[in-house]
Amino acid sequence: MSQTEVGKTGFSGESRVISMTHKTLNATGATAECMGVLAELGQSTAAGRSGTCLLVDMSEIERITSEGLNELIALNSEARSRGVFIQLLDVCPSVRDVFKLTRLERMFEFGTVAATE
């Protein structure tokens, strides 16, 4: 993804941060763009490292479409199949309300970027 930044963070265990924008999240194929990162994290899990995590920075997203929700669900499913934990960071209140209304908030963990540093 050209607009996605991938880097290391101080989160415990092996982790990567992916910063999503409205355009990248709400476009079909966002999950496919993250597969390389998930493959790398999945190898860490397979090597016996615990605490493998994909942190999705959503601070730039003010609204989410059904395509965006579907992409996050697919990303979460793929991550879990590889033994990788996903946490959504800095989700704004209006987007968090969508997660509550669709009952998807039970599927995801939420946090803040400040808490991962």
Image (spheres, grey):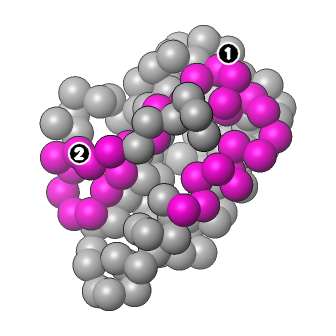
Measuring from the top left, give residue 29's x and y in whole percent.
77, 46
Magenta range is: 7-36
Q: Which residue is mark 2?
A: 9
Badge 2: few (under 14), some or many (20 or more) residues near its Cα, within 10 Å? Answer: some
Q: Earlier in the sequence, mark 1 or mark 2?
A: 2
Tell me what residue is drawn at x 22 percent, y 27 percent.
Answer: 114
Q: Secondary structure at mark 1?
A: loop
Tell whether 71 sits left or right of 83.
Answer: right
Q: Which residue is mark 1?
A: 63
Task: Using the rendered image of the protein, determine whether residue 102 is visible from the camera's viewpoint.
Answer: no
Tell me what residue is drawn at x 42 percent, y 53 percent.
Answer: 54
At label 2, which amino acid type do we have? Thr
**44 above or below 92?**
below
Image depth: mark 1 or mark 2 in front: 2
In the current view of this chain or complex, which residue is farthest to the bottom? 47
Q: Secondary structure at mark 2?
A: loop
Measuring from the top left, give residue 27's x and y in whole percent.
78, 33
Q: Is residue 20 magenta?
A: yes
For the C terminus, the image quarter is: top left
Tell me what residue is drawn at x 51 percent, y 70 percent.
Answer: 39
At label 1, which amino acid type do we have? Arg
Tell whether 110 sits left or right of 93.
Answer: left
Measuring from the top left, give residue 105's x and y in whole percent.
59, 39
The reply to whether callout 1 and callout 2 are in contact (CB within 8 Å) is no
